[in-house]
């Protein structure tokens, strides 16, 4: 059982629909948060207690700096929520190089670099008797790659594969990696693609419901949330 009270957690994508709801629940549970996103103004507009740190996760040098500042702010790091991401729509053979670069830089490489930068702090948290965790949100497309979302699916499937393997490696260090794979969720992500236009999508999950399931999994020590875990 993970106790959120007084835990030090870095939330990436905190100004996005799902990241915001997860952050609210963590704060309500007593966690001390560092809220990160690209836009400082959007972070400042959040009605959630915590330190605001804007960062561009597509910049490899920004990631260790963000982790270091998060540790400085709260004195330690007990958890990371990877809720940052971008999406692109369109035929697989028409995806541009610019789109591919941004999809993989933010959806895949940034979480990998974050774990690398945070490993020692998370190991120290475990050695001090806490239950450090890293949450990734690879989504249902990592289980079921989707037509007209081929590049996006690939970026998320790569993240899921990395997390599964890294989780096995880090288990002895006491670091838990939790991958969540909800289906379409009613956030603004699909309305701001970096390429293409979203098709008409069926009604998705409520961000509040998905966030609650993720936070429950953190508290209960779960290591995997398949897409079926979000079905009522």
Image (tube, rainbow, N blue to C red):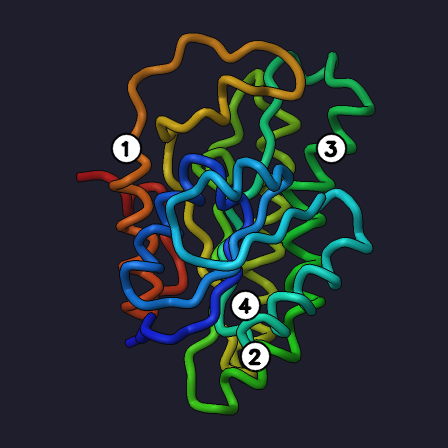
- Quadrant of res 129: bottom left
Q: CA distance from mark 3 to mark 1?
A: 27 Å
Mark 2–mark 3 Cα distance, whole angstroms, equals 32 Å
> CA gap, disc 4 to disc 1?
28 Å
Sequence-first disc among 2 and 3: 2
Q: Which quarter of the rendering shows the N terminus? A: bottom left
Q: CA distance from mark 3 to mark 4?
A: 25 Å
Q: Given this view, does label 2 or label 1 mark the residue nearer the observer?
A: 2
- N-terminal label among 3 and 1: 3
Image position of 129 with respect to 79: above or below: below
Which is nearer the N-term, disc 3 or disc 4?
3
Q: CA distance from mark 4 to mark 2?
A: 24 Å
Badge 1 density bin: few <14, some 14–19, many ≥20, Cα 10 Å: some
Which of the two marks, 4 or 1, is nearer to us in this view? 1
Q: Which mark is residue 162?
A: none
- What label does residue 167 carry, if any? 4
As drawn, the residue found furthest toward the bottom would be: 128
Residue at mark 3: 102
Q: Which mark is residue 206?
A: 1
- Circle 3 residues within 10 Å: few <14, some 14–19, many ≥20: some
- Give the secondary structure at mark 3: helix
The residues bearing labels 2 and 1 have C-alpha atoms spaced at a distance of 34 Å
Residue 29: quarter of image: bottom left
Which residue shows up at 58% across the image and 27% down it? 87
* Residue tagged 2: 75
In the rendered image, residue 45, in percent from the top left (x then y), is placed at 47, 39
Whether the residues at callouts 4 and 1 have beta carbons within 8 Å, the answer is no
The extreme left residue here reads: 232
Q: Could you tell me which secondary element the residue under label 1 belongs to?
A: loop
- Give the number of callouts: 4
Tell me where residue 22 appears, x and y as whole percent.
37, 50
């Amino acid at each position: 059982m993970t106790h959120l009270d007084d835990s030090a957690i870095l939330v990436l994508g905190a100004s996005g629909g799902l990241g915001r709801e997860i952050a609210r629940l963590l704060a309500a549970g007593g966690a001390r948060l560092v809220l990160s996103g690209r836009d400082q103004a959007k972070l400042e507009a959040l009605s959630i207690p915590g330190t605001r740190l804007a960062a561009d996760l597509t910049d490899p040098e920004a990631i260790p700096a963000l982790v270091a500042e998060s540790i400085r702010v709260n004195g330690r790091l007990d958890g990371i929520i990877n809720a940052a991401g971008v999406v692109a729509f369109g035929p697989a053979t028409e995806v541009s190089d610019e789109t591919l670069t941004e999809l993989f830089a933010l959806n895949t490489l940034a979480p990998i670099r974050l774990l690398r930068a945070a490993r020692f702090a998370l190991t120290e948290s475990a050695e001090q008797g806490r239950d450090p965790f890293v949450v990734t949100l690879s989504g249902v497309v990592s289980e079921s790659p989707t037509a007209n979302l081929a590049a996006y699916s690939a970026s998320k499937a790569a993240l899921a594969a990395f997390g599964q393997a890294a989780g096995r490696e880090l288990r002895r260090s006491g670091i838990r990696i939790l991958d969540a794979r909800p289906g379409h969720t009613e956030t603004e992500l699909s309305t701001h693609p970096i390429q293409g236009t979203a098709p008409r999508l069926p009604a998705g999950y409520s961000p509040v419901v998905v966030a609650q399931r993720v936070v429950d999994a953190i508290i209960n020590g779960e290591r995997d949330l398949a897409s079926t875990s979000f079905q009522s």
